[in-house]
Image (cartoon, rainbow, N blue to C red):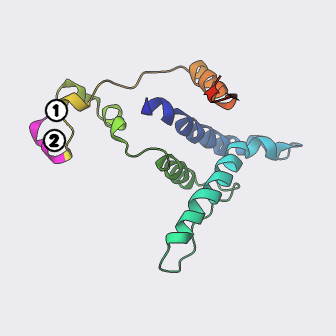
Amino acid sequence: MEAAAFLPFAFLQMRIEEEIEDEMNWAGQEDGDDFIYFYRRLVENVYNTLISRSQQAIDDEGEEPFYLDWHSTNASDWEDAIDCLADFIFYDRDWQVTSLHPQLLDGLDKDFSEQTGIFEDYISNRLPKVSSEQVATALSEIQHWQQDGNDFV
């Protein structure tokens, strides 16, 4: 379930990396900014609104919070920003353990379990592989959710 909820964040990261790589291809075209910076503008708006205000509120050292600029081509900054946004939703990232270390599905070492608190019955399965078409369908359905009374349709 958590892996499915993380999909839009992974998709955003992928699209921003593509935007950065393709930026020069769009340069000089009429209305190019709409295409060049679409996903970066989306993430910048949410990040600067949610994260930066939160950082400013808890910053005791008087340092300026980090603000994104949608013109930035620093992929690391975008990855960090998307990670921060995901942290607003996910309590932890335990579900990623088997994605990053699939060998754990073959059995957990006792020392590993004692150090991490993750035991055999906690790990269920690997994340499913999805095609680009499945990603597009899932994102389209998320973008077009409508609320009907108390239920989503």
Mark 2 sits on what residue? 112
Mark 1 sits on what residue? 108
Q: Is 87 placed left or right of 81 in the picture? A: left
Which quarter of the figure has residue 95?
A: top left
Q: Residue furthest left?
A: 110
Q: Position of residue 21 (x, y in %)?
A: 64, 42
Q: Position of residue 47 (x, y in %)?
A: 61, 55
Q: Amino acid at mark 2?
A: Phe
17 vs 114, nearest the viewer:
114
Residue in the image at 67% along x and 42% along y:
19
52 vs 99, nearest the viewer:
52
* Main SS, magenta residues: helix
Residue in the image at 33% along x and 40% along y:
94
Q: Does residue 58 sit above or below 74 in this rendering?
A: below
Residue in the image at 29% along x and 25% along y:
124
Image quadrant in which the C terminus is located: top right
- Residue range in magenta is 108-115
